[in-house]
Image (cartoon, rainbow, N blue to C red):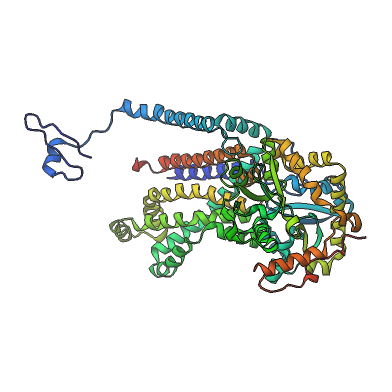
Amino acid sequence: MQQMIPLGRQSRQKVYPGVVSPTETLATGFDRPPRRQYRLLSQWVGLPLVLLLLLIGWQMLVMMRDYQSFILPGPAVVVERFIITAQSGLLWHHTSITLQAALGGFVLALGVGVLLGYLLAHLRWMERALAPVLAASQAIPILAVAPLLILWFGTGFSARALIAGTITFFPILISTIVALRGIPHELREMALISGATRWQMLRHIEAPLALPVLFGGIRTGLSLATTGAVVGEFVAGRAGLGALITIARGLFDTPLIFVALAMLSGMTLTFYLLVYLLERLLVRWEW
Amino acid sequence: MYLKTLIIILMLMVLLVAGCSAGSPPSATSEPEQPGLPVTHTPVAADQQLRRVTLALSYMPNVQFAPYYVARSNGHYVAAGLDVVFDYNFETDVAQRVARWPQSQIEFATVSGASVLLARQQGLPVQSVMTLYQDFPVVFFSKSNVPLATPRDLRGRSIGIPGRFGESFYALLALFYASGLTEDDVQVQEIGFTQAQMILEDRVEVAIGYAMNEPVLLRQQGVTVNILRAADILPLVANGIVVSEQLIEQDPDLVRRFVHASLRGLQDTLDNPDEAFTISLAEVPEAELGDPELQRQVLLESLPYWHSALTDEHGLGYSDPEAWEQTHRFMLASGLLTHPVPLAESFTNEFISD
């Protein structure tokens, strides 16, 4: 956004946001990025400071309103419960169940989504036939579908992975189609002129160039896979972080609910960072 | 490119192995128990041949399923030749799953009487073979400054219900059906499952919930609570064991063995609540993380509902025909049932006796 820009001996010229003539832009230059030390300061100090302020605000709210722990526990109570639950082995037990279902659903969605996305990107007639149906299916809330999947497939791993895969599938599908459609036609034509086979086109042109956009869908999908796994555990089953939340609710153990939510957040963040690192490694030309 | 491909494959393998090996889901096989984790299987000798059956419990693990936990722990199911696996699911879903036996592989389920009638209305061939709760366990509750001696005390009061579904909603409809009050005489508020909080913060004057849940929690918070039992307003059939008609037809002996073993577990629970509580904690170790004493109170509050003068006369697990008739009439009058269902096919006392 443009600011008040001193123009030397000329009178100050007020520049309205979004309404700047090209000559002024060239004369005054663009906003400079913050210096490196400020960037590091915001990264290493800003975030922890914000978190600390949130924790303080949370604790003050609990103390001022004198909330019982089953209504709103304070952060210290949650941390203590986290440690106890972790030491008992129950936290990892439930987390591993959710992790399995989330990863299983993600792998399923990735396989089906990329394959179907490739077909829809290349076969217009298939896209015209399937795209409206797929789009309409997104209007159906997963909470309505999950009990049906449990009814048909039971409460085991396969049903929960299927629920996770259902919610993960669409972002991956769309990012695959967008990624492949975004490849310049000129590159494809050059490859064809050079005698590239379908496999060579996929391996040397489509796959590398589609990766940046596809990773966006993967990041989103992996986060949603966790949500899907939890939804399956809400509906049925005895283990998993979703089941732990349900059990904790039945026990009126609100701190334990917070523990499960913290673990879910941590799991999703870890997935996000892993995919980010993988993307940095594999798509170096984009960084 | 090859190095990148190799890295991708390695990272995927690490993720998959981490997910699969970090903790396999508990199953009712011969896997050893791990301290602190839920009990998952029947302890059996290696040479013992048992028939594996599944009991689908409605909603979530809780000390209120103590009779079944005790029956498994005390070996009653094994003595009956059964390896019982517990499964957890929404109540309406367990009814559908048990109706689909043998495809669903769910032989038994805990379902309320109202849900049995609703299921039969939809053509689900399910039948109640044992009643655990002899009285409908839902209550109206309030702080001590709000009198709750009779239904008339509810006139003009704000009443919080979780929603227009489930047993709490049926209790509200039973109030209107039996007392002459209408919804215009009260202020109904749908508050989700926050009854205890809403009462504590005076956001509603009265709330509806299970006698062994929110009122116990409030008492533990030092709140004196008034109770008006829905069972005293209108006797309704409550929770019990349900099976499919096909199972009864094909293997009545299995049903009888399971019911008898469960009733032995119930008797042990009534005779020794402390031991039953300890056994329940092994099934629900999460209860030890927070306030185990609260859960003990939940169990103690449940005990009086599991026996009655009728069970003293006819035996534990008895299904009262009059209560079923009453429930049927109420549900028809309230519009919950659109047409009558055959009561004779909805429940039986055949399996509780020897």
| Furthest residue toward left | A9
Among the 4 quarters of the image, the one containing residue B98? bottom right
The C terminus of chain A is located in which quarter? top left
Q: Position of residue B62 (x, y in %)?
A: 72, 46
Q: Position of residue B147 (x, y in %)?
A: 67, 47
Towards the viewer: B334 or B4: B334
Towards the viewer: A68 or A272: A68
**Against B237, is A258 above or below?**
above
Q: Which residue is drawn at the image coordinates 79% and 38% (left, top)?
A: B278
The N terminus of chain A is located in which quarter? top left
Q: Which residue is drawn at the image coordinates 75% and 60% (left, top)?
A: B236
**Is B284 positioned to the left or the right of A206 in the image?**
right
**Observer able to see residue B127:** no
| Furthest residue toward right | B354
Q: Position of residue A235 (x, y in %)?
A: 62, 54
Q: Which residue is drawn at the image coordinates 67% and 40% (left, top)?
A: B218
**Is A113 positioned to the left or the right of A251 in the image?**
left
**Against A214, is A259 above or below?**
above
